């Protein structure tokens, strides 16, 4: 029958995709949900995730928990600054889950964290590494960093095996955020002012991330470590526009607008943070993940983007979103 895998956030982009992948493999899966979905034979509603969530019954018989649920990063400044709200779910809620999991006899907890724990920008010459000191820059990232710290303490105290995965921006069918906005602009044939950008961004395709999570479920050596996972290639924003356009059978419409002009326009319109995510570099060194863990992304960046585009063109569904 195999081990039973509990998945939190089973209605979100990653959690839903992971449940579908595990069920396709014939593996026992328990969807741990905030409210009734009615889509899976083994589904347990746990309600809101916080320091008081009751997990013990829901985790009975579960061998591995993959914690995908989170209060996600948003662009709204007021919501970004609500540290208490992020901590309630992402820090205290995660710690409560780990404590209850250990008490219920769960052997391993895989925590989907974020590369934002490392910081907001990193050049190709000095990419983020798993062993770098955390430098979270906003409330979301701080809550994830604090959750990681709590998990290591609980692991040491209880013997629970903890695995931390820090992904970058996830792309795939149903994605939201900047990626969805960029895809919509390319589909409409809008001219985009990023032709002069010379940045590099680490991304990960949904199928690659799910594959990496499954690898961490099954690999003993994954426990006790932080793993950075990304696609093999790190495109610039102009590269990304070109890949999306090619998948749509369109010509990219890139204008070479100087970065200072873009920055001035973004400041006037209150879009400075969004612009930074499109023009700054965020590079990750995943060499340890490949060498020590033995995992490599099975799909190319281009294939992952093609899958996202095909899904958007065919049905436009959005099952949820994970924004690191």
Image: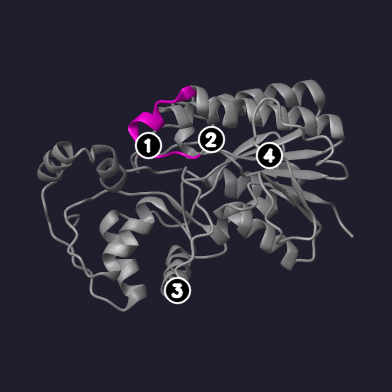
Q: Residue at the location (34% across, 63% down)?
A: 183
| Front disc: 3 or 2 | 3
Q: On residue 187, which mark appears?
A: none
Q: Secondary structure at mark 3?
A: helix
Q: Nearer the viewer, mark 1 or mark 4?
A: 4
Q: Nearer the viewer, residue 283 or 125?
A: 283
Mark 3 crowd level (few <14, some 14–19, many ≥20, 10 Å Cα) = some
Quick check: is 74 in the magenta stretch? yes
Residue 211 seen from this side: no
- In the image, the segment drawn in magenta is 72-83
Q: Residue at x 48, y 39 (%)?
A: 115
Between the C-alphas of marks 1 and 3, the distance is 34 Å
For disc 1, the marked residue is 126
Name the front one of labels 1 and 3: 3
Q: Against 151, is 233 above or below?
A: below
Q: Are marks 2 and 4 in contact (CB under 8 Å)?
A: no
Crowding at dot 1, Cα within 10 Å, few <14 / some 14-19 / many 20+, comes out as: few
**Residue that carries the numbered disc 2 in the rendered image:** 130
Query: Are the residues tagged 1 and 2 within 8 Å (C-beta)?
Result: no
Please tell me how crowded label 2 is: few (under 14), some (14-19), or many (20+) other residues with Cα within 10 Å.
many
* The image quarter in which residue 57 lies: top right
Question: Residue 217: x and y, percent?
Answer: 73, 49
Find the distance from the CA under tag 2 to the CA under tag 4: 32 Å
Badge 3 is on which residue? 310
């Amino acid at each position: 029958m195999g081990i039973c895998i509990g998945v939190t956030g089973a209605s979100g982009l990653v959690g839903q995709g992971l449940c579908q992948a595990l069920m396709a493999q014939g593996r026992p899966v328990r969807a741990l949900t905030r409210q009734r979905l009615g889509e899976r034979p083994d589904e347990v509603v746990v309600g809101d995730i916080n320091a008081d969530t009751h997990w013990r019954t829901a985790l009975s018989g579960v061998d591995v928990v993959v914690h995908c649920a989170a209060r996600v990063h948003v662009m709204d400044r007021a919501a970004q600054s609500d540290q208490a709200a992020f901590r309630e779910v992402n820090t205290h809620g995660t710690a409560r889950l780990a404590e209850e999991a250990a008490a219920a006899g769960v052997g391993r907890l895989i925590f989907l964290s974020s590369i934002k724990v490392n910081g907001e920008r990193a050049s190709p010459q000095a990419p983020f590494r798993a062993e770098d000191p955390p430098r979270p820059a906003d409330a979301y990232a701080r809550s994830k960093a604090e959750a990681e710290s709590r998990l290591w303490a609980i692991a040491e105290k209880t013997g629970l095996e903890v695995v931390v995965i820090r992904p970058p921006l996830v792309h795939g069918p149903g994605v939201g955020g900047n990626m969805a906005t960029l895809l919509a602009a390319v589909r409409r044939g809008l001219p985009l002012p990023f032709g002069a950008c010379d940045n590099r961004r680490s991304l990960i395709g949904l199928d690659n991330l799910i594959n990496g999570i499954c690898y961490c479920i099954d690999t003993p050596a994954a426990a006790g470590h932080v793993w950075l996972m990304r696609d093999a290639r790190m495109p610039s924003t102009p590269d990304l526009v070109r890949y999306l356009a090619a998948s749509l059978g369109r010509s990219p419409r890139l204008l070479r607008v100087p970065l200072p002009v873009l920055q001035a326009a973004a400041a006037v319109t209150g879009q400075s943070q969004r612009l930074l995510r499109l023009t700054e570099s965020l590079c990750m060194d995943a060499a340890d993940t490949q060498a020590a863990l033995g995992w490599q992304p099975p799909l190319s960046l281009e294939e992952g983007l093609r899958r996202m585009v095909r899904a958007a063109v065919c049905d436009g569904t959005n099952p949820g979103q994970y924004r690191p």
